[in-house]
Image (cartoon, rainbow, N blue to C red):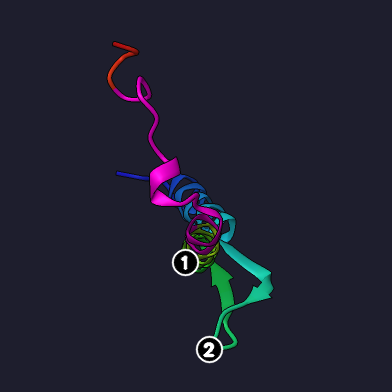
Amino acid sequence: MRTTQEAYGHLKLVEMIGEAFISPNERDRNDQDANVVDGLFAIARAIRYLAGVLEEQKISTAPAPAMTRRPGDWDGGR
């Protein structure tokens, strides 16, 4: 059976872990303290945005189809 001190230690540990995943300095869309899921979602949105920008640049700067492949480029130089 756990002592009161052991139980308090476990509760304190749970509280500390919870605090590590919640930031009172940041707010989510619901004006609540942001948590690690909010952070990961923000990173995913940023990656999605950057992928779109890079895709647009790739399309706008792509060479003409006749210029994209030269003899030896993809056949190992044979």
Per the image, label 2 sits on a secondary structure element best described as loop
Q: Report if residue 72 lies within the magenta region.
A: yes
76 lies left or right of 19? left
Q: Looking at the image, is mark 2 or mark 1 earlier in the sequence?
A: 2
Q: Which residue is mark 2?
A: 30
Pick the quarter of the image with the C terminus: top left
Q: Residue at x 45, y 44 (%)?
A: 6
| Residue situated in front as seen by the camera: 57 or 7 | 57
Residue at 50% over, 55% down: 58
Residues rendered magenta in the picture: 55-74
Q: CA distance from mark 2 to mark 1?
A: 14 Å
| Nearer to us in this view, 48 or 40 | 48
Inspect the image, locate mark 1, and give the three-letter code of the amino acid beneath it.
Phe
Q: Is residue 67 above or below residue 60?
A: above
What is the x, y in percent for residue 35? Answer: 53, 67
Is label 2 or label 1 in front?
1
Q: Which residue is mark 1?
A: 41
Does residue 48 belong to the magenta stretch?
Answer: no
State how many labels appear: 2
Q: In the drawing, does residue 75 fall left or right of residue 14?
A: left
Q: Is residue 78 left or right of residue 6?
A: left
Q: Nearer the viewer, residue 75 or 53?
A: 75
* Residue displayed at 57% across by 79% down: 28
Q: Is residue 73 left or right of residue 31?
A: left
